[in-house]
Amino acid sequence: MMAEYFLTAFDPSGETLINERFEAENEDAAKKQGEALLKEKELHHHTHRLVNAAGKLILFQR
């Protein structure tokens, strides 16, 4: 069963640069997918977080 995950990245001023919802089979798959999206959009050096639908933090970087 697929679960929902939410990826958000911010610039230093706090502005939201990306706020995307996607589905993945598990937390590991979601983490890989989230990291790939960040690199694709060249946002991997910005502050970002990945959470599941319940709000559990899966990935965070300042």
Image: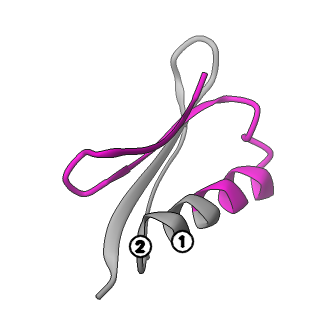
Taking depth in this image into account, of 5 and 59 the one nearest to the observer is: 59
Is 52 left, or right, of 36 in this rendering? left
Which residue: 32% across, 68% down?
Answer: 4
| Residue that protrudes farthest toward the top in the picture | 13
Q: Amino acid at mark 2?
A: Asn
Instruction: List x then y, in percent, for residue 39.
Output: 78, 52
Q: Quadrant of residue 33?
A: bottom right
How has the structure been colored for display? one colour
Compared to 33, does 19 lie above or below? above
Q: Determine whether 34 is above or below 58 in the image.
A: below
User: Which one is in front, 14 or 58?
Assistant: 58
Seen in the picture, residue 8 relative to 11 is either above or below; the reply is below
Residue in the image at 24% along x and 45% along y: 55
For the point 51% across and 17% down, the residue is: 14
Residue identifier under label 1:
29
- Mark 1 and mark 2 in contact (Cβ < 8 Å)? yes
Under circle 1, the secondary element is helix
x, y percent for residue 47: 61, 27
User: What is the magenta range?
Assistant: 34-62
Reading the image, the residue beneath label 2 is 26
Whether 60 is among the magenta residues is yes
